[in-house]
Amino acid sequence: EVPLVESGGGLVKPGGSLTVSCAASGFTFSNAWMNWVRQAPGEGLEWVGLIKSKTNGGTTDYAAPVKGRFTISRDDSKNTLYLQMNSLQTEDTAVYYCVTESLGAFHVWGQGTVVTVSS
Amino acid sequence: QSALTQPASVSGSPGQSITISCTGTSSDIGHYNYVSWYQQHPGKAPKLMISEVSNRPSGISNRFSGSKSGNTASLTISGLQAEDEADYYCSSYTGSSTLLYVFGGGTKVTVL
C-alpha cells in the first residue's frame, strides 16, 4: 500500500487554474502536518506550503512565490490533501509532491504529479 | 531567503567516504536543529536520509551520518556503494513567514 498518491496533474494554459489531490492511506492522516514540495524540470526541490493538523489549528503557510495564488486544504474524512492553483505561470511547471512533515523533516513522499503550464 | 549552498557534485570510489556540505545562515541552519537530508534517484521521489541534523530514520543505513557546525551542515557517506549514486538535497527550517523551509540546490554524487 502506497501511503501517498497524488493525482490531477496536467497541461494548463498560463493564467489558468488546476487542483491536484493527494490520497493518504496507512497512517492517521488527520494528525499529520502535510506539505507540498515541487521540483521544476532539471531543478532542485522547492517548498510550496503546508497545512497543520486540525488539532493544531489547521492553519496554512505558503512560500512567497505562490502566496495569494495557491491554496492548500484538507478533507480528513476522505484522507485527502488538496492544492488549488490559480493564475498559473510558466514557472509553476513542476512535479508536485505531497509530503508528511514532522520535527522539521519531510518523512513520507508521494510519487508526484506533473503540472505543465504552457500555451 | 536564499537557497542553501551545496557543491554541485562530489565523487568517490567504492568503499571510500565522502562528505557533502550545506551552507546556510544564522537565520536557518545556524539557528535551528531542523536540518534534514534527502536522497533522490533519477525519476524517483526524494527519500529522507537524516532528520534533526543527525538522526537516521528507521531503515536507513548507518553508513549515512549528519552533523552541523555553525551555519554549515554536512552529510557523510562512508563505505560508498554503487547504489549511493544519486542527487542529495539538504533542507532547513527557517521560521520565516515568506519561506518556512529552504532547500539546497542539490549535489550529484558519482561513484567512480
Image (cartoon, helix red, strand yellow):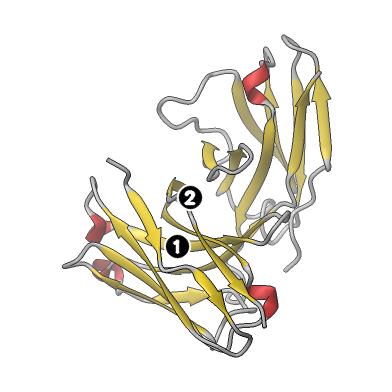
A48 horizontally vs B104: left or right:
left
Q: Amino acid at mark 1?
A: Asn
Above or below for A68 versus B77? below
Q: Which residue is mark 2?
A: A106
SS at badge 2 = strand
Q: Amino acid at mark 2?
A: Phe
SS at badge 1 = strand
Q: Is residue B35 visible?
A: yes
Q: Mark 2 or mark 1, which is nearer the start of the sequence?
A: 1
- B44 and B9: which is toward the camera: B44
B35 horizontally vs B70: left or right:
left
What residue is rendered at 50% in x and 33% in y?
A: B55
Q: Chain of mark 1?
A: A
Cβ atoms at labels 1 and 2 below 8 Å apart: yes
Image quadrant assignment for residue B75: top right
Q: Which residue is mark 1?
A: A35
